[in-house]
Image: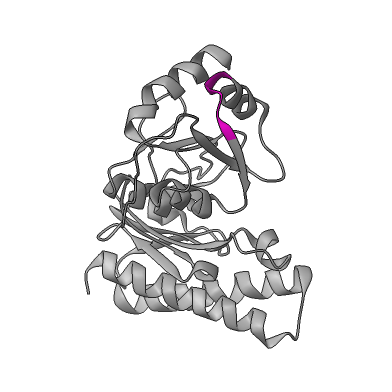
Amino acid sequence: MTDAELARAVAREAGALLLAIRARGDCAGAEMGDRGDRQADDLIQARLRAARPDDFILSEESADDRRRCAARRVWVVDPLDGTRDYADGLDDWAVHVGLAIDGVPAVGAVALPMRGQVFASDDPRVALAPAPARPRLVASRTRCPALVERVAGALAADLIGMGSAGAKAMAVLDGRADIYLHTGGQYEWDNCAPAAVALAGGLHASRIDGAPLRYNCEDPLLPDLLICRPELAAPVLALVAALA
């Protein structure tokens, strides 16, 4: 199995597990979210350690082994991105399985189980139609940052609320949105896999100052992100600089 094939298989299996937990109906709300986080993490850790025993894993749901900082290959995992959306019975949650090599988001898979889709860096399945007259900017459904609202206003963009970071990024990839802009706090596991898939599909992915995304940092905080159609990167970055 290539790294991308492994990422896809593991993300798909974890997504199926999360759907099964929901379908059993023996828990709900926060308990279901906690169970999903824990069991999906256990599955992903087991599969990756069996297939790539020499690699390190950075997961939202497991203790951080800082020895990873000296490693070239680190899997960056969010077993259930959008835990609240999952627990609330919504559809826009995801599974992220990314691989950073020398700090670069080299490989990734993002599963959207409720849509029956897995996007991977070796098959990103980009579906970009001609850009609409009004760009569509996807942002947090519950806590859209003020800067994002200002950029949307300056672009005369339609603002679309959505849950998981992976769901937002894949909405740009499959043509349902044009821009995903985030400020105000994320961690490496929130965007490593989405960034790897987006970059493989020819999208722009960077920090909001235009700097490259870097992973396997000692502090995994990665507070801002821009994923968008390549022709929109320059105007969005210019607006961010002017409005911040």
Tally the marks: 0
From the viewer's side, name the closer residue of 194 and 118: 118
Look at 47% across and 50% down and name the residue there: 171
Residue 241: give x, y in percent of width and height: 49, 16
From the viewer's side, name the closer residue of 39 and 62: 39
> Is residue 157 on the magenta stretch?
yes
Q: How is the image coloured?
A: one colour
Q: Is residue 201 above or below residue 79?
A: above
Quadrant (top left/top right/bottom left/bottom right) for the C terminus: top right
- Which residue occupies the extreme left position in the image? 2
Q: Is residue 115 left or right of residue 192?
A: right
Residue 11: give x, y in percent of width and height: 43, 70
Q: Is residue 182 above or below residue 18?
A: above
* Residue 102 shows in the view: no
Look at 58% across and 76% down and name the residue there: 18
Location of residue 104 by image quarter = top left
Location of residue 123 by image quarter = bottom left
From the viewer's side, name the closer residue of 69 and 30: 30
Residue 68: give x, y in percent of width and height: 39, 55
* Residue 118 shows in the view: yes
Look at 46% across and 44% down and name the residue there: 218
Q: Is residue 92 above or below residue 152?
A: below
Look at 50% across and 30% down and name the residue there: 134
Quadrant (top left/top right/bottom left/bottom right) for the N terminus: bottom left
Q: Is residue 147 above or below residue 132?
A: above
> Is residue 155 on the magenta stretch?
yes
> What range of the chain is rendered magenta?
154-158
Residue 95: give x, y in percent of width and height: 50, 64
